[in-house]
Image: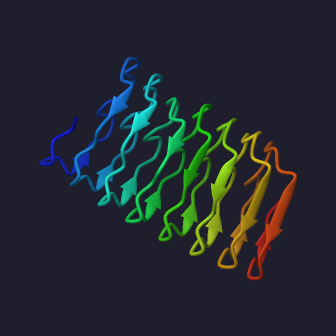
Amino acid sequence: TIPNTVTDIGPWAFYDCPILSEVTLSTEMGTINHHAFKNCTSLEKINFPSKLIFIGEYAFANTTLKKVQLPQSLTEIKAYAFQDCKDLESLNFPPNVTDIYSYTFQNCKKLKDIVLPSGLMTIQNYAFDGCSSLGKVTIPGGVQTINEGAFQNSGLTEVILSDGVVSLSN
């Protein structure tokens, strides 16, 4: 349990803690910096407080999180943040997330339930690469660009593109 006096988890704070299985974050937490929980290979459960606005690169990469409930306050999830979370099955996207950065969910092999936010504008390179259980995705109307390999090696069987998409890369 991280006390309410803590508002920021610094880079590499809990990196490579293989026995850490559950984290209760401060209700005042606003930032989780890069590599904060990377390689915490037993981390299955974490609460995301309602004031959280930023998740840094690789913050939860290679953890065993299964379901992620992101707070409505969140505005930015950086590249690689959930890369190689092979047990991740579902997550919600808060409405203020406008970009899904490169490799953010790469190799999340069990990820199947996602609802992209209506305010989303860009899905960057390889964002969902290797998400082999992802079968269907609806791209909201605000998305203008889907970059190279965004859904490469995924299990997509159905893609619904809303009006507004202007650029699809390779």
Name the residue at 49% across, 46% down. 68
Name the residue at 65% across, 42% down. 106
Left or right? Give the position of 114 relative to 20: right
* Residue 26, horizontal then vertical, whole percent: 22, 46
Report the residue that reaches farthest toward the left: 5
Left or right? Give the position of 25 relative to 145: left
Q: Is residue 66 visible?
A: yes
Decide: is 41 above or below 25.
Answer: above
* Residue 159, horizontal then vertical, whole percent: 82, 62
As rendered, which of 96 and 11 lies closer to the eye?
Answer: 96
Decide: is 58 above or below 122.
Answer: above
Decide: is 93 above or below 95.
Answer: above
Report the residue that reaches farthest toward the top: 19
The quadrant the C terminus occupies is: bottom right
Number of marks in the image? 0
The quadrant the N terminus occupies is: top left
Quadrant of the image occupied by residue 107: top right
Q: Is residue 104 visible?
A: no
As rendered, which of 161 and 89 lies closer to the eye?
Answer: 89
Left or right? Give the position of 107 relative to 153: left
As rendered, which of 84 and 64 lies closer to the eye?
Answer: 64
Name the residue at 32% across, 30% down. 14
* Residue 32, horizontal then vertical, whole percent: 34, 47
* Residue 60, horizontal then vertical, whole percent: 46, 38
Report the colour scheme. Answer: rainbow
Name the residue at 36% across, 44% down. 47
Report the residue that reaches farthest toward the right: 157
